[in-house]
Image: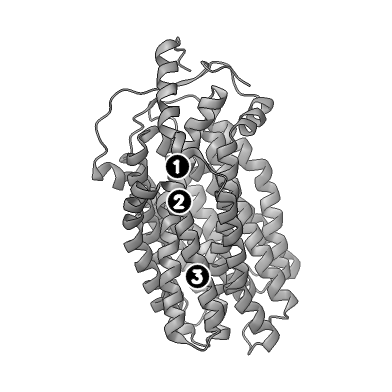
Amino acid sequence: MMTDNSQQSAMPKLPQLRLRDKIGYATGDFAILLYLQMVSMYLLFFYTDVFGLPAATVGIIFLFARVWDGINDPIMGNLVDRIKTSRMGKFRPYLLWGCIPLAVAAVFCFSVPALGPTGKIIYASATYVFFGMAYTFITIPDGALTSVITQDSKERTDLTAVRGFFAICGGFTVAAVTLPLVDFFGSGNAARGWQLTMLLYAFVGTFMFLYCFKNTQERIVIIRREDKLSLGDVLRYLGCNSQLIIFVSSMLAIIVANVISQSTMMYYLKYVVKREDLLSPFMAITVACMLAGVFVVAVIAGKLGKRNSLALGYAIMILSFLGFYIEGGNNLPLLFISGILLGFGTAFQAALNWAIVADTVEYGEWRSGNRAEGIVYSTATLMQKIAMAIAGITSGAILSYTNYVPNVIQSAEAVFGIRLLMSLIPALFCILSLIILCFYRLDRHYKQILTELNQRKSDSPRHVN
């Protein structure tokens, strides 16, 4: 284990965060969700029903991209930790450098070039990998900003609640207006409609990232060890940061549940409920409950703690997925009640996930003596992308196994497969996530850990890197 005094956090008494500070940071999450929601909710549908790829092939593309992420994300996390702080800060510059590549990659993903079947597979694989790399480049530093804006646990919860609110707004924008925009821009040409819609989102996302860059301040001064972390150091750090590993494992399972249900919703309404026109009102009600819930969650977390509050949210999500199974496409009131429960349950994640990840930065520093935000957030981002791959592979496999055929009346077998993807399968992943979360223990020890870190700081010499 690395020495305890090699790296510390300078913790002067800082003024409380203003709402303006929180909003400035949260605009980055609005941008991130424009991209993430488009990919998680619509890319599978776009690839099968517009781009023309078989569902099983799409699953393989998602797997290939995640294998590459297993190499790329840790490298990016270590790079973030190694690069010295500039006059613009340590993490903020990535927002400036990464917004354009991410925008370009996203537009490429939702474009349909004039290629043959093999060319389309190569194109989809290359552009999706490019998107994953660009997404990593900007989201790891963006997430790490939380840990240098404040170390106060309550402020972190409040900050991530505002982040969650803006993230939900970004997700809601995509869910509510994407299909009308596709119809408007496409005028009967679906491929053109999807491309121009993504181009519009990319323009808005770029503006939001630039606004976040300008209006976010890195307030915590980090004192770093002068020698660089080797691969062995990284592995030892992860080995001793058990709370990070436990939480991101739980987060992986719940994101799988989220992405499967989100990417299946189009299929469910189109082929099971046979009311594709309900997507916008359904998502509007669901996201409205998320928006209302995210600030209620901040209050609940003050009473129950972050872990217990998150567990409550998972339980509500399980109920919602069971509701979808019982509804079966034949009970519209139950469909919308299940959507309301899903929205409120998901609000717990939006408000708490990244606050908990930020807490594991201090836990890792306390255990190892090294503060490594890049490693922490690259691990969380990698788990997020692995979850998306598992969701894509699972969805593609089920659709393929049940003989799903795009744009036709589905067989009873295919309809049942879509129902499973909207209900029992994500419910099982929710249960798995809840079980793993039971082993997370940091809530009760966080204040003591922060006190000990401050004591080490005052007792140790500083060497600024």
Which badge, 3 or 1, comes first in the chain's sequence?
1
Q: How is the image coloured?
A: one colour
Up the image or down, 154 lies above or below 283; here it is above
Q: In 3D space, how far apart are the residues under numbered discs 1 and 2 (Cα atoms)? A: 26 Å
Residue marked by disc 1: 142
Residue marked by disc 3: 319
**Residue at left 41%, top 59%?**
347
Q: Residues within 10 Å of mark 3 (few under 14, many from 20)?
A: some
User: Foreground: 221 or 39?
Assistant: 221
**Residue 122 in view in this figure:** no
- Amino acid identity at mark 2: Asn
* Marks 1,2: beta carbons within 8 A: no
- Amino acid identity at mark 3: Leu
Q: In 3D space, how far apart are the residues under numbered discs 3 and 1 (Cα atoms)? A: 33 Å
Q: Residues within 10 Å of mark 1 (few under 14, many from 20)?
A: many
**Residue at left 61%, top 61%?**
429
- Secondary structure of the residue carrying numbered label 3: helix
User: Foreground: 151 or 384?
Assistant: 151
x, y percent for residue 261: 55, 69
- Secondary structure of the residue carrying numbered label 1: helix
